[in-house]
Image (cartoon, helix red, strand yellow):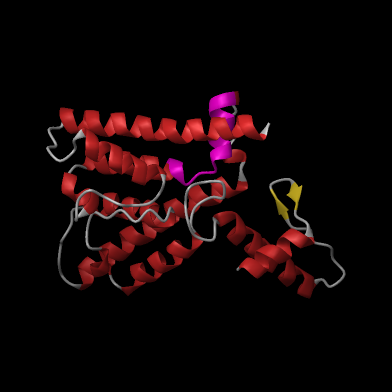
């Protein structure tokens, strides 16, 4: 039922906020991070799960100066941009269907690919400028952090990414349009629509090569109707 499902989804949403608040607060106490009080943990949890990106500090996540906190926020940003239906199926029914979902597979693959692109662009830029501004680990951490932060449209920051060169800025610009999965808290066009448009373009190219062929567009095992395809194209 819609009412029951809505309650479960709200429960999952609030549960993620509560879990992240506890984790951040405990990390702040154990690691001795003075700026990670309960108020800060709660505010950053709200803004991570909602993929809003606001912070109680001007320099955002960099204020905590902690890799542990950074990776915690990366993990929860990643979760928040996944379709909440998949969380629902896993938590309520015990079905781990994440890798059976076409949109999630694209989401995870894109996250990995963009992280690697950021890493190699930063590495190339430092070699070109004869500098060594970050260690290998810092490059990796910042690459993954910004890939997740921008693809999920959260917008948390740790360093000045404007110094990363034009190649990375173009990638960031594209990511902010694409967004995360449908049924999540992210902004942007959503990956499912982008995936559908790409599948449509592929079918058009096949049709040009083989005019008499029939090439239905499917997401997973489900065939997508022309009405939905037209509405997505119009949205784009």
Q: For residue 74, what is the image quadrant?
A: top left
Tell me the residue at 58%/35% (across/down).
6
| Quarter that holds the N terminus | top right
Percent coordinates x, y for residue 145 in the rendering = 32, 51
Tell me where residue 210 sits by quadrant: bottom right
Residue 71 visible at all? no
Instruction: State which region is magenta.
Output: 79-92
Q: Residue 226 in the image: x percent, y percent?
A: 78, 62
| Relative horizontal placement of residue 211, taking residue 157 as reference (left or right) | right
Is residue 17 shown left or right of residue 221? left
Q: Main secondary structure of the magenta part?
A: helix
Q: Where is 112 relative to 210, above or below? A: above
Reply yes or no: does residue 84 show up in magenta: yes
Q: Is residue 78 left or right of residue 199?
A: left
- Residue 125 in view, yes or no: yes
Position in image of residue 41 (x %, y %): 26, 37
Task: Report the front residue among 56 and 180.
Answer: 56
């Amino acid at each position: 039922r819609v009412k029951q499902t809505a309650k479960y989804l709200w429960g999952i949403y609030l549960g993620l906020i509560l879990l992240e608040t506890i984790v951040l607060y405990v990390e702040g106490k154990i690691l001795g991070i003075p700026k990670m009080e309960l108020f800060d943990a709660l505010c950053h949890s709200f803004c991570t799960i909602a993929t809003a990106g606001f912070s109680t500090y001007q320099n955002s996540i960099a204020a905590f100066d902690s890799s542990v906190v950074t990776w915690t926020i990366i993990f929860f940003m990643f979760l928040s941009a996944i379709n909440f239906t998949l969380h629902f199926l896993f938590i309520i029914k015990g079905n781990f269907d994440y890798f059976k979902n076409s949109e999630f597979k694209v989401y995870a693959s894109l996250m990995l690919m963009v992280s690697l692109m950021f890493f190699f662009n930063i590495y190339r830029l430092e070699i070109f400028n004869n500098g060594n501004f970050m260690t290998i680990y810092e490059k990796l951490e910042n690459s993954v952090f910004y890939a997740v932060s921008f693809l999920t449209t959260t917008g948390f920051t740790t360093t000045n990414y404007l110094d990363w060169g034009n190649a990375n800025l173009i990638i960031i610009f594209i990511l902010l349009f694409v967004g995360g999965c449908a049924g999540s808290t992210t902004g942007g066009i959503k990956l499912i629509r982008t995936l559908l448009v790409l599948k449509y373009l592929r079918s058009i190219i096949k049709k040009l090569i083989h005019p008499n062929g029939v090439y239905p567009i499917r997401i997973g095992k489900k065939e997508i109707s022309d009405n939905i395809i037209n509405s997505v194209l119009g949205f784009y």
